[in-house]
Amino acid sequence: MPEEKEITVQNYLDYINNKKLMGSKCKKCGTFDVPPRKLCIKCNSTDMEWVEMSGKGKIAAFSCIGVGTSFMVNKGYSMKKPYCFSVIELNEGPMISGQLVGVDETKPDDIKINTPVQVTFLETELQGGEIRVDLGFEPV
């Protein structure tokens, strides 16, 4: 069980930086949320706890993007080399977004909804040597 940190966006991002996908679980009704919430959206309880998610799920939606943000353009993505952004339904229930990797982004018709995936943590070195960690998902 993880240490009892306050449920905040910053702590969630800190977990991602440490390559852990964490969410919240309502102690009253068992609802999971990712990103975590301080208030259960099902029963309105504030009795929440951190839980580590399995990182496994399936593709619920995706889009292949050729004209992206400057961050993605700086990583080398373009009209000729698109990237895929996805919404993943985790096995625990919540949906979360992240980059879809390990697929042919130039052939979106080959990417199928409900394909099983697992989390991967994508590292990007920023100016000054700082490492940014983002969520990605790849087919299993």
Image (tube, helix red, strand yellow):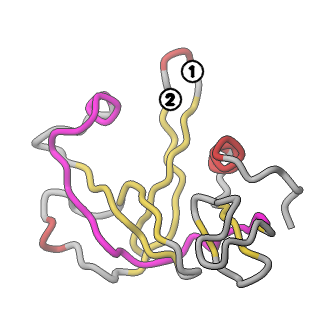
The residue at which mark 1 appears reads as 129
Query: x, y (%) of residue 106?
Result: 14, 57
Amino acid carrying label 1: it is Gly
Residue 116 falls in image quadrant: bottom left
Q: Residue at x 52, y 73 (%)?
A: 94
Q: Secondary structure at mark 1?
A: helix
Magenta stretch holds residue 67: yes
At a point 34% along the width and 62% down the height, the residue shown is 86
Q: Is residue 48 magenta?
A: no
As displayed, is residue 1 above or below residue 120?
below
Q: Which mark is residue 48?
A: none
Residue behind mark 2? 125
Q: Position of residue 95 (x, y in %)?
A: 46, 70
Q: Quadrant of the N terminus?
A: bottom right
The residue nearer to you, when weighing 42 against 136, is 42
The magenta-colored residue range is: 49-74
Image coords of residue 44 (percent x, y): 67, 72
| Image position of 106 with respect to 59: above or below | above
Q: Please tell me which residue lies in front, 12 or 28.
A: 28
Using a 10 Å C-alpha cutoff, classify the residue at mark 1 as few (fewer than 14 neighbours), some (14 to 19) or many (20 or more).
few
